[in-house]
Amino acid sequence: MDPPSLTESGGVDDDGGAAGFDATAGRQPRLADPPEVMFELPPVRSSSLLPPSSSSSSSSSSSSSWRAAAANGGGGGMRGVDCDDYVDEFEMEGLIETFDREVRGRPPTRSWTAVGVPVGGGGFVAALSTLRRLVPSKLGGSSRISLDGIRVGAADGALARRCSYLAAMCSLAWEPRNRSRSAIALLFVSLLFTAILTENDVAAWHRSIFGRISGKKGAKGDPSLVGLTDDQRQWLLKSLYGSYTFYDGSAEDRPTVPYMTAENANNTYLDLPEEKFPMESWQADAVYANHFLDAAEKLVKRGQQAIFATYHGLGLSDVRVTTDEGGGERVDYVREDAEQRSSRRSKMFHMEEIDLNAVTSADLLRSAAPAWERKGGWTTERSFNGLERRLIHAMMTRSESHNGNFTVVFTGSWQSMGYGGNHAWQSTAGVFETLLKGLFEKLGVNLVVRAIGLPPLSNLSTEEQTELIDGGKSTLLHTLGWSSIYGSDVDMVVWDDYGAVDDGGSVRVADELSTQLFDLFARQALLSGNTSLPFIWGGDFEVLRYLHNYADADVGQLGNALAGVPETTSEISASDLPWPAQFLNCPANMQETCEKEEYQFESRCWVERSDITPPMPQLDHIPIIPSAIGWKMQKLKGFTLAYVLLTATLDALFEWSEITISQGFPLPDEHWHIGEYIKNVQDKVKSLDESVAPHCFKLEKSMNLPRRLCRHKMSGRTEYTPRANPLTTSIRSLLLIDHVSETRPSLLYDGEDVVNPFSEIPRGEVDALEIFGLQGKRRLRQRFLSSKNVTGTTATDDIHRRRTDTITPGEGWRLLHSYGDGCDGSLSSSNTCGRLSSSNCLLEGHQGSRGGIWGNQTTGWLVLRGIKPENGFIALNLDFGRRNQTRREWHESLPESFMLECVTGGKSKRLDKAKFADIIKQPPGMSLLVILDDQKSGEATDVEVAVRVLGCDDHASCQFAVTHVYWS
């Protein structure tokens, strides 16, 4: 259907779109709001209802007759009517004024004048009917009173559906013989009760009551959208932002034989030479490519505008539905100045480009980019160009057989990952994936998002928990197996520990060990890619600087755009702000209020459904940890990163368009090929000198990690979840035979969950996904997406010659505490991850679990094969005794006869209790045992690793688990 016609009063949108519309083809026109005038009521006998409204002339005549009768007979001089059956003007005015003061806490700006309304018998219903037709005035400023069901105290709330039963009860009680002053009180109580049921009351107590019921917490909605029907709203948004209508008009002519392959490109990067593009391919089709670039640019602009509108509304005023000459509806409005709105948007998400040759410290950074952490963040010109190259490469490698991939990994502390009170879809990563997945599909790019992180440990002291959180120390568990656990296909990594702050405004300062560990993390990220190279967001400034200057790495630090969020100055004023902005950006005197759990967390552990009954009683909501970061800050950070990535995408599209105007299609190789770009950075990371990049090398002293790990890629396997490619990155994938029982935890159910009420966006609020046009079911924040998607001892008495006895895999090893092989960190994998029958919060959605292969003396050898330590390093992460015991606890629980035996490449090593305690290293959250450290090794040959425990009569005290296997 063609879009309706449009009208506008002033202003154009950022893209020059039209405004206003006719949305009613074939529908009855809706009456406009009555004019703002004082009213008078016609005479009605107490024994009859008010007659239907007639023409304007008869109404005028009736009103005149009523005025005359009132003048002649006063308040009770009407023939045939008992004066005591009326509410006189003072009673009506007093009643409504009293009610308004109770609800709003202030006197009305305009009082009512009602003359002699009969209410005996059916008079109450008649009065309501009359008021519904004739009431034009406003009460309490902008609030309407329209007794079409008594709409009182709300600009957009209709109470007809909720009040009709109460009105009927009042009418039955209003008989002349029973009437007394107590009836007035009954009416007052009825009206007050209906106000309590109103969703949009501005009083703080009302917001609190109804917010707990509906999850909307007092959201009033954008005034531009409130009161519009679904069709009206849809057409209004299309008039402002347009819609994506691009299609391939020559799809039937495209190549049928895959051409975007490693074999055809003669490289694994899919850097297809220009001359190998078929003439009929879309990359070489000037008509297609030009139209695609134009549509893509408009789509990305709409995405940025939608993100801004989420926190600042649509920028419209005087929105009204009127009736045109043809009887159809029109929506007219006045729009905010486009240039001013664009300027505010740019300031909110401003990404500062700095010169890291001149800015040599974090202190100088604050001078060069003031308050960057409260805007979009900072990067460098060269780095941002590198991000654009990655995006163009992802779009250029799309073919008829597949989309190009762009992979983003989020990692950091449990706070950064959204644990401690939020659903997975409320986390920064979940928000980012939900927002951009569909948009990138339209660009021919498969956006892969992995959130790889772990929940907090419950058995740690406050000091231990702080040590584990600060500076990303918890990421070491996965850093030592980076290319396997995070993935070797990563284009952008978000390391968020320094951005995970309580007040949303400050930035943590890393200690020396944190800096060292981040240096190792960043180097492993850059070395991990076989066909990709991550852009690194976040981390220690000094490390980022020297990786950029000496290894050509692309780096930056993300902000949170908080400076551009409207400020919450009071609880009452919060209701006037867009819903996600409420209680988010607060002055000092409001911080304590804004940090209240009711304003920062919204969750529900279970929604009843007919097909599943959880065996474990479900909690009411996800338990909230005091230092957790609520969904509003998580959402803002996700939106900020999305905006920054869209900015890079838009710049990439502009560059692509400008280059091909002069040089033609396809885009020349030098503007999008990635292979040489990757090899340059990786070669420079391997050759970084300690004099300019010292931190990683210091881990040899602080944690006994070999220096060569700073220059060589590491691989690994784990039973922790989530992880990249979980089916192929488990420890069980290294087993000689499948001698581990319970290899897959049983899911209570799979598939999509029913709609969580807290995932619903309040009606009238701006929904960025609705503007994108990417969401199947309107008005949901949650969107279920389609599926994929320490140096060891060298003591001679511990080293034995090659064993002559056969190592036989033992029996009874068990996989415990795992969420299974369906957890890859993406939102879509939540449908096949976790959901254990033992869970008391099945809708949480997070995928973090600490699984392990558990055994004891009776289970014999755990034998692993397929390990290829090219650089002579193998290590295991172990768990002993009860899960997550401290070093002191598990050491005291081991008997003196304890013995751990390892075999690596045929060489055996036996460690008694004392030697084992001496050799094992315990960085935060780990028990790391290095079983091979041979610096002379230089060939990647298969090595067999076996491990077992002996000397344990008490099997419970000597139970242990292998949770990670690392090698390089």
Image (cartoon, grey):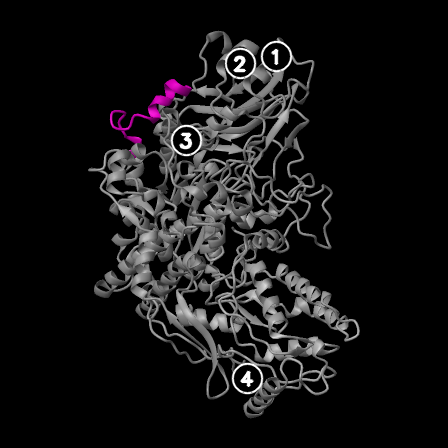
Per the image, label 1 sits on a secondary structure element best described as loop
**Distance from label 3 to label 2 (Cα)?**
29 Å
Residue at image coords 63%, 11%: 895
Q: Label 2 sits on what residue type?
A: Phe
Which mark is nearer the camera, 4 or 2?
A: 4
The x, y position of residue 608, in whole percent, is: 70, 52
Pair 4/1: label in front: 4
Seen in the image, is 317 located left or right of residue 276?
right
**Alpha-carbon distance for marks 3 and 4?**
62 Å
Q: Specify which label sits upstream in the sequence, 3 or 4.
A: 4
Q: Which residues are drawn in magenta?
A: 685-704
> Residue at (69%, 45%) from the top-left corner?
748
Q: Is residue 600 visible?
A: yes
Q: Earlier in the sequence, mark 3 or mark 2?
A: 3
The residue carrying mark 4 is: 26
Which callout, 1 or 3, points to the residue nearer the camera? 3
Q: Which residue is mark 1?
A: 898
Q: Sequence-wise, which precedes: disc 4 or disc 1?
A: 4
User: On screen, 221 above or below 790?
Assistant: below
Determine whether label 2 and label 1 are within 8 Å by CB. Answer: yes
Q: Report the residue marked by disc 2.
A: 916
- Lateral position of residue 713 relative to residue 749, left or right: left
- Dot placed on the residue nearer the N-terminal end, 4 or 2: 4
Q: CA distance from mark 4 to mark 2?
A: 82 Å
Instruction: Say which residue label 3 marks.
Output: 471
| Other residues around mark 2 within 10 Å, as few (<14) / some (14–19) / many (≥20) | some
Residue occupying the far top of the picture: 797
Q: Earlier in the sequence, mark 1 or mark 3?
A: 3
Three-letter residue code for mark 1: Phe
**Which amino acid lies under the numbered mark 3 shown in the image of this protein?**
Gly
Q: Position of residue 107 (x, y in %)?
A: 52, 62
Q: Amino acid at mark 4?
A: Gly
